[in-house]
Image (cartoon, rainbow, N blue to C red):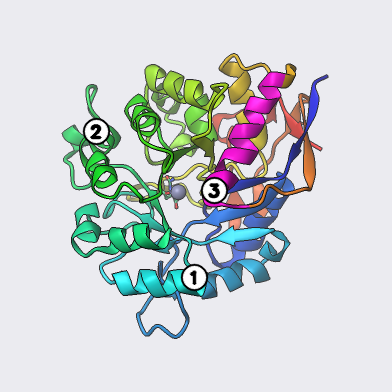
Amino acid sequence: MTSFTLPKWYDLHVHLRQGDGMKAYIRAQLDMGCAGVLAMPNTKPPVGKVLKDDPLDYWCIEGYLDLIRTNGGDAFDDIIVPLYLTRDTTPDMIESGAKSGLLRAAKYYPPHGTTNADHGRPLQDFIDKDVLKAMQNNGIVLCVHGEEHGLSGAEYFDRNKTAEEVFYSQRLPKVRDALPGLKIVAEHITTKTAANFVQQSGDNVAATITPQHLLYTVGHLLQGLRYHLYCLPLLKFEDDRAALREAATATDNKKFFAGTDSAPHTTKCTPCGCAAGCFTGGVAPQLYAQAFEEAGCTLDRKENQNIFKQFLCSNGPDFYGLQTPSDTFILSREPQQIAALKTDDGDVTPLPLGLEQNTIPWSIK
Ligand code: NCD
Ligand code: ZN
């Protein structure tokens, strides 16, 4: 049986929410060997300011960090909370936030583009208001949900072009070229177009890839309408998955890293549609290992274990300037049973339980 030891890793895109479920979501991260997280700011209200004494009517990075720590997150080595870019974000806020040490990243959400994205503004606004320039000048990372906003249904997801492809071929190249020193993370990429954009950009541009986008395609979601697989950006096609697999498992991969986008919802089906977000708390390294093997990168070979380690444990911390932790955990090719996560807020169904599979091929020791 194959088993190997890895340094603890950083999940560089996860939703820890707020309220009664938080403790369980944080526990699930710690249980899967997480040394730390980049915790998303799409809370209610969003994390739209840095400091407590800023009078704006948002939650602040300082306050959300405290909440995460008091709910079990004090066990993490480090936590990054990106600032949610809103109509009220100013270059001054970026500069003073950077000086305070609390602001390390900021998140672009396409307006109304996903769960709790109603405070998002078009990317152009942040160029016009010199917010992105202030980020570049202060070394603040731009985390991007890369889908073009405001498209009609027919333009949003078409056989030839999706909102993500429009964004990475028409919108983001202009930002990258105008601000060549800006650090950008293309988050949860799903297409060959996005992978190519990252590969063709400089060292200041990197990407996260989720377990679900390495494992599945849109056909898996549609066959049975498996709504637990419904997340945004939507799963794509076989050639897209192949491009993501190739990027993640390349021997010289330095740009692509783990960010699960684990996004717990206690109610997926609502009268107005399906909540977007897949939950992979507790199982993400195991699912990444499964995906690597399905991509032909078999993990009984030492050199492939090193490629996996680059993706899961090293590239992300290198990009964000985090220390690689000295603590370790063991990944083992031994089947593991999975169950719904019980939280004080209700049950959450992890992948691939939502696909009616209660066993995964890898486990954590
Ligand atoms: C996320 C969520 O549920 O908060 N959903 C998702 O589909 N990934 C929001 C997001 O990051 O898009
Ligand atoms: Zn997300």
Q: Is residue 345 visible?
A: no
Circle 3 SS class = strand
Residue at the (59%, 53%) spot, across then down: 37
Q: Which mark is residue 61?
A: 1
- Which residue does the numbered mark 3 point to in the structure image? 12
Q: Is residue 179 left or right of residue 302?
A: left
The tag earlier along the polypeptide, 2 or 3, is: 3
Task: Identify which amino acid the numbered label 3 is placed on.
Answer: Leu
The tag earlier along the polypeptide, 2 or 1, is: 1
Prevailing secondary structure class for the magenta stretch in the rendered image: helix
- Asked if the beta carbon under badge 2 is closer than 8 A to the nearest atom of ligand 1, the reply is no
Q: Quadrant of the N terminus?
A: top right
Which percent across, then down, holds residue 12?
54, 48
State which region is magenta.
303-322
Residue at the (70%, 64%) spot, across then down: 72
Quadrant for residue 242, please give it.
Answer: top left
